[in-house]
């Protein structure tokens, strides 16, 4: 099979017109899994089962029966979503709580649209981490440089999509777990409004901040996946805009908080948007210490994993165990204050957007760091890597507003750099439309 099909939309169209069959696409995806095994992106695959499923979809396509817009397209799923016939381990050795239903609602929606569920992808243990490293399952390696991190916790999903294993993936995002891997791997990642995509049948980390969403190679592919995953449940009422957008850039929030390389790339992105007709205005957005604001939500994570923590805590990696155990120390008052702060922060973000269509800022402060890195050098000086990344990813998950990560540049070493668009709660389609506009303007 010639490697001419690059996007989900191209794959779906090729199946519709008979230029490719689901079986051919599944065979190619399985070959990619084998060829790129060293990336460690895949947690579970049953090749024979995948081919049997693809053969059924092929017969249906040949008889003119199409289940939906994803008929026969291979898709991977992060290993915290239940999938019939595949184990759910969530990158841990600990016993997981019972997860119902037996197949996640989001996976059911993919199947109903005709997707071929190819495999499950590796992840940071119980989704707690932004790096992509896991001592139990092995690190997921960045497709652009295996010495680099993929970002987490949807590390395998991002690496698989970037490496050509399937045409999209289902991930989750609690504080950046879709957008950071997308930025590091040079693909698109969309975190919808809170509740827009069902998480029933998925392992929770922080139910008040957890989101499900797509990772794909283009914004248009992400739009198709979002429409399926959300069942159009949170469509924006805004009309399609014929004019170039107004984008609000929180310059004071960004200054000093990125590497010089990222700042120069982001400045070029803003300039390119301006040249294509966008109006750029300064946004006022301040946040003193997001990590402290978010910390009380650890109580939810400790509650979810309390049985495993009480009976065999050694089944968690030390860093993950320590982070989870912190949740037992949170007072009810601190937790309730944090819940109140979610609404306060949402209002602050929407005030920062103001009359603009969206906030525009980096998706991450840097290109993918080397694996094992815990500190990065920003323009303002050395900074803890987790805190530096959380500054750009965490607030928008905590507030539950739509946030889209898309490639904006490459470094001289060929590493990806990502920009991020943030819209008001419920304006999911607006975020995706603006993303498509910016993707076209940047032409990465």
Image (cartoon, grey):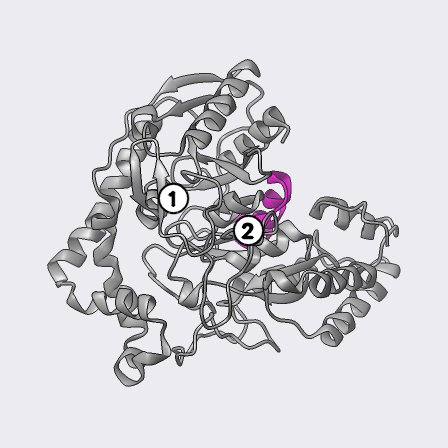
Residue name at image x 59 percent, y 31 percent: 439
Where does the C terminus fall, quadrant-wise? Answer: top right
Residue name at image x 30 percent, y 66 percent: 301
Q: Which residue is mark 1?
A: 393
| Mark 1 → mark 2, Cα distance in angstroms | 16 Å
Given this view, does label 1 or label 2 mark the residue nearer the observer? 1
Q: Is residue 173 magenta?
A: no
Mark 2, residues whose alpha carbon is within 10 Å: few (<14), some, or many (≥20)?
A: many
* Residue 24 percent across, percent down from the top left: 83, 60
Decide if residue 24 is on the left or right side of residue 254: right
Residue name at image x 28 percent, y 30 percent: 285
* Badge count: 2
Cβ atoms under marks 1 and 2 closer than 8 Å: no
* Residue 90 percent across, percent down from the top left: 47, 70
What residue span does the magenta drawing correspond to?
215-232
Q: Secondary structure at mark 2?
A: strand
Which of the two labelled residues, at mark 1 and mark 2, occupies the earlier sequence position? Answer: 2
Q: Secondary structure at mark 1?
A: helix
Q: Which residue is mark 2?
A: 214
Vertical order, 247 against 368 (above or below): above
């Amino acid at each position: 099979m010639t490697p001419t099909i690059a996007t989900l939309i191209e794959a779906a169209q090729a199946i519709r017109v008979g230029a490719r069959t689901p079986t051919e696409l599944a065979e190619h995806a399985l070959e990619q899994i084998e060829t790129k095994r060293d990336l460690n992106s895949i947690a579970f695959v049953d090749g024979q089962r995948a081919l049997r499923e693809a053969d059924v979809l092929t017969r249906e396509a040949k008889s003119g029966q199409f289940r939906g817009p994803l008929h026969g397209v291979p898709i991977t799923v992060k290993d915290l979503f239940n999938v019939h016939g595949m184990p759910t381990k969530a990158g841990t050795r600990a016993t997981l709580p019972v997860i119902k239903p037996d197949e996640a609602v989001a996976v059911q929606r993919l199947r109903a649209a005709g997707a071929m569920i190819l495999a499950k992808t590796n992840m940071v243990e119980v989704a707690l981490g932004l790096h992509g490293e896991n001592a139990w399952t092995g690190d997921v390696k960045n497709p652009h440089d295996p010495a680099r991190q993929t970002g987490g916790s949807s590390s395998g999903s991002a690496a698989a999509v970037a490496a050509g294993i399937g045409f999209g993936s289902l991930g989750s995002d609690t504080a950046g777990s879709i957008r950071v891997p997308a930025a590091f791997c040079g693909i698109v990642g969309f975190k919808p409004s809170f509740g827009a995509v069902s998480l029933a049948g998925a392992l929770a980390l922080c139910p008040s901040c957890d989101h499900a969403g797509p990772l794909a190679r283009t914004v248009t592919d992400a739009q198709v996946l979002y429409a399926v995953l959300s069942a159009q449940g949170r469509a924006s009422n805004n009309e399609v805009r014929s004019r170039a957008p107004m984008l609000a850039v929180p310059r004071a929030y960004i200054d000093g908080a990125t590497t010089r390389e990222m700042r120069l790339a982001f400045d070029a992105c803003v300039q390119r948007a301006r040249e294509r007709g966008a109006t750029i205005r300064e946004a006022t957005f301040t946040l003193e210490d997001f990590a402290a604001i978010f910390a009380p939500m650890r109580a939810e994570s400790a509650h979810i994993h309390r049985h495993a923590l009480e009976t065999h805590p050694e089944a968690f990696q030390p860093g993950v165990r320590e982070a989870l155990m912190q949740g037992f120390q949170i007072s009810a008052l601190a937790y309730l204050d944090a819940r109140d702060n979610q609404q306060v922060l949402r209002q602050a973000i929407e005030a920062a957007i103001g009359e603009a269509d969206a906030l525009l800022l980096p998706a991450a402060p840097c290109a993918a760091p080397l694996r094992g890195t815990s500190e990065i050098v920003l323009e303002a000086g050395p900074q803890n890597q987790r805190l530096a990344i959380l500054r750009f990813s965490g607030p928008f998950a905590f507030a539950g507003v739509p946030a889209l990560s898309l490639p904006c540049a490459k470094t001289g070493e060929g590493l990806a750099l990502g920009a991020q668009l943030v819209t008001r709660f419920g304006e999911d389609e607006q975020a995706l439309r603006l993303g498509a506009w910016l993707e076209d303007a940047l032409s990465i």
